[in-house]
Image: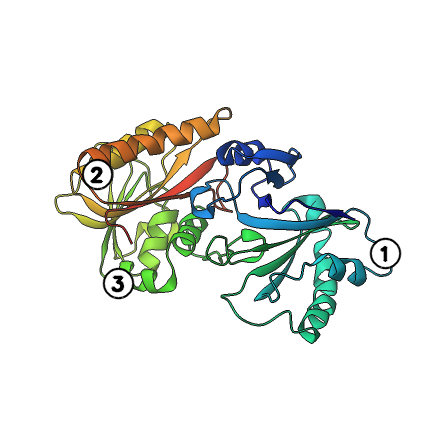
Amino acid sequence: MQTAHPQQWLIYCRPGFERDCVEETQAKPVEVIENSGYVALEGKPRLAYAQLAFARQLISLYGEIEELPERDRLTPLLSVIPDSPQQFGALYLEVPDTNEGKTLSGFTRRFQPLLETKLREASRLLDDPNLPRLHIFFPDKKRALIGSSDPRNSANSLNGIHRVSMSHEAPSRSYLKLAEAFEVFLDKSEQALYLKPGMTAVDLGAAPGGWTWQLAQRGLKVTAVDNGPLKGAAASHPAIKHLRQDGFRYRPQKPVDWLVCDMVEQPQRVSELMIEWFIGGFTQRAIFNLKLPMKKRVAALHGALDGIRAALNAKGIRYNLETKQLYHDREEVTVFLSKSKR
């Protein structure tokens, strides 16, 4: 058994983005395996989950077991859980988000109730969302990394993945991206406040209509802007108005509550479009995707976001800016920009 340094971190990410995780944290890599879906880092006493675009989950590492016995896994795992914090609000047994990792999911499901029982008997596991969560991560059946996440500085879902269900009427699977974005960036009270039926939205580059359909399902009146056609139920929905226009040139006659955009364009060009909309007062809130290049992803992302910050700061506009690579994203990240700090 090898005890981890107190300032070590375990971060989950989309497989293939491990190096980007390391780069944006500026921490020292301890374990980085390409396409593994996780990294171990050290050297940063504090990391802010909300400021990490590529991190699905942020876990403070306590220790590691390199050779789990096949017959008795409970004893060594219980021995490596530190005395402090004394109690946890949840227990997450997790595996990498890879094909190899998924083969371990049956093992974790069977093992979870056994470990939960032991922790509850010792009064170390309570149903309290304010307490740290205990994470045990299995890169494989013989190895376990043990740590905890702060509910105020992490994702609240297993593996850091907010799972959403697909509407059978949605014109495309991109519907899932916006559905997940609302869950990640807005809590339930904010969704009720900012996504009220009758509010207005513009979807730039809307075709075939996945994001437009997600907005319409939430009761918003949507102007879908794209020279291409909308498909399926989005083509005839009464709350959707389709304009065959260039998304970069369109501006609404009146300000709208929401702007969404999932166009395949250079990150810099999309960020400049968002700047024009916010400085022009055309919207209060936006969710948009930035398609990243294969190389220098972090530099491209920071360049686009820094441009937005500089432009809005120069105009004295108060704003909130958050970025995450969502589970349903691919070579892209999703950005939430709102005109007033929450």
Mark sitting on residue 277: 2
**177 with respect to 125 (left or right):** left
In primary-sequence order, the first of circles 2 and 1 is 1
The three-letter amino acid code for the residue at tag 2 is Trp
Colour scheme employed for the rendering of this structure: rainbow
Taking the view exactly as shown, the residue that stands out farthest to the left is 253
The image shows residue 215 at horizontal and vertical percentages of: 32, 54
The three-letter amino acid code for the residue at tag 3 is Pro
In primary-sequence order, the first of circles 3 and 2 is 3
Quarter of the image that includes the C terminus: bottom left
Label 3 sits on a secondary structure element that is loop
Residue at image position (55%, 61%) is: 132
- Among the 4 quarters of the image, the one containing residue 17: top right
Q: Nearer the viewer, mark 3 or mark 1?
A: 1
- The crowd level at tag 3 (other Cα within 10 Å; few <14, some 14-19, many 20+) is some
Q: How far is disc 2 from disc 1 in space, using C-alphas?
A: 59 Å
- The crowd level at tag 2 (other Cα within 10 Å; few <14, some 14-19, many 20+) is some
Q: How far is disc 3 from disc 2 in space, using C-alphas?
A: 23 Å
**205 with respect to 293 (left or right):** left
Question: Is 149 located above or below residue 131 in the figure?
Answer: above
Residue at image position (71%, 45%) is: 100
Tag 3 residue: 197
The image shows residue 98 at horizontal and vertical percentages of: 65, 44
Mark sitting on residue 70: 1
Tag 2 near tag 1, CB within 8 Å: no
Residue 245 in view, yes or no: no
